[in-house]
Image (cartoon, rainbow, N blue to C red):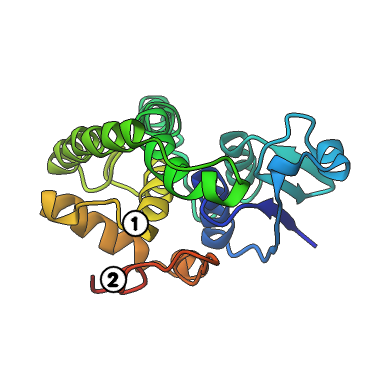
């Protein structure tokens, strides 16, 4: 049985979930309180982070490495371009969202509003929340610029870059931190990607103590 140790709102876990679902790989989801540093979990991943995927007889960590392994061993439908320039652009944008967007936005909004409460680390830092709210505008504008020139973020076909972006935005959308009125182009892209069957389990997530907005699971926004 394929098993994913995850946290529901983690964008890195969601990226892996999307890849598995797109490839129609059945998976058992196991919610992992990684912050408790349980010895069994640390044996699975000494880095003490999620996601961790038990797959093909391996215990795998690091979301992008996991997704690339899935795509290489289960190539249909493809999420990683075969042409080097297109593959570079896809990887550049995955890095953009998992590094720059994460540091400037996700960690400032989701982690302050949700993770601190869940892990008992205290109250949100209003300075971080304000900084994240400012930064997301820049990122949405950049996405709009990309989508004005392409059908999908990295080119004319959907790739792992779209799943990386959607994983972060869906986590933030759960707590109403995305201004979808800022760009009709980005909103249309997100409506298109969240209508995919791969998104169903993510849209069904329910986090105790946090209720998503009505539009969260609405495929028509």
Instruction: Residue 154 in the image: state x and y as whole percent.
Output: 31, 37
Instruction: Residue 39 in the image: state x and y as whole percent.
Output: 87, 40
Q: Quadrant of the C terminus?
A: bottom left
* Residue at the disc numbered 2: 215
Q: Are marks 2 and 1 in contact (CB under 8 Å)?
A: yes
User: Which dot marks residue 80?
Assistant: none
Residue 21, compared with residue 104, is above or below; it is below
The first of marks 2 and 1 along the sequence is 1
Determine the image quadrant of residue 45.
Answer: top right
Q: Quadrant of the N terminus?
A: bottom right
Residue 173, compared with residue 151, is above or below; it is below
Which element type, helix, strand or loop, lies under badge 1?
helix
Which is nearer the eye, 145 or 22?
A: 145
- Name the residue: 28% across, 41% down: 153
- Label 2 environment density (alpha carbons within 10 Å; few <14, some 14–19, many ≥20): few
Kindly tell me whether residue 51 is visible in this rendering: yes
Q: Find the residue positioned furthest to the front.
A: 122
Spatial CA distance of label 2 from label 1 is: 9 Å
* Residue at the disc numbered 1: 173
Which is nearer the eye, 126 or 83?
A: 126
Q: Is residue 168 left or right of residue 40?
A: left
- Name the residue: 37% across, 57% down: 175
Which is nearer the eye, 120 or 146?
A: 120
Count of labels in the image: 2
- Name the residue: 22% across, 48% down: 151
Which element type, helix, strand or loop, lies under badge 2?
loop
Instruction: Residue 105 in the image: state x and y as whole percent.
Output: 35, 36
- Name the residue: 44% across, 41% down: 112
Determine the image quadrant of residue 190.
Answer: bottom left
Instruction: Residue 32 in the image: state x and y as whole percent.
Output: 71, 52
């Amino acid at each position: 049985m394929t098993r994913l140790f995850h946290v529901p709102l983690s964008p890195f876990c969601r990226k892996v979930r999307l890849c598995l679902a797109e490839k129609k790989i059945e998976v058992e989801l196991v919610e992992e309180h990684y912050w408790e540093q349980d010895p069994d979990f640390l044996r699975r991943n000494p880095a003490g982070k999620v996601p961790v995927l038990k797959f093909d007889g391996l215990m795998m960590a690091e979301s992008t490495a996991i997704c690339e392994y899935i795509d290489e061993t289960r190539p249909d439908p493809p999420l990683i371009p075969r042409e080097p320039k297109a593959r570079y652009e896809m990887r550049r944008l995955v890095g953009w969202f998992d590094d720059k967007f994460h540091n400037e936005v996700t960690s400032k909004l989701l982690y302050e509003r949700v993770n601190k409460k869940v892990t008992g680390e205290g109250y949100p830092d209003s300075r971080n929340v304000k900084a994240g709210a400012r930064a997301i505008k820049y990122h949405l504008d950049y996405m709009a610029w990309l989508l004005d020139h392409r059908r999908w973020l990295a080119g004319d076909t959907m790739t792992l870059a779209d799943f990386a972006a959607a994983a972060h935005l869906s986590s933030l959308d759960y707590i109403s931190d995305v201004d979808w009125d800022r760009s009709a182009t980005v909103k249309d892209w997100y409506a298109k990607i969240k209508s995919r069957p791969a998104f169903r389990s993510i849209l069904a997530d329910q986090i105790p103590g946090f209720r998503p907005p009505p539009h969260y699971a609405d495929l028509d926004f």
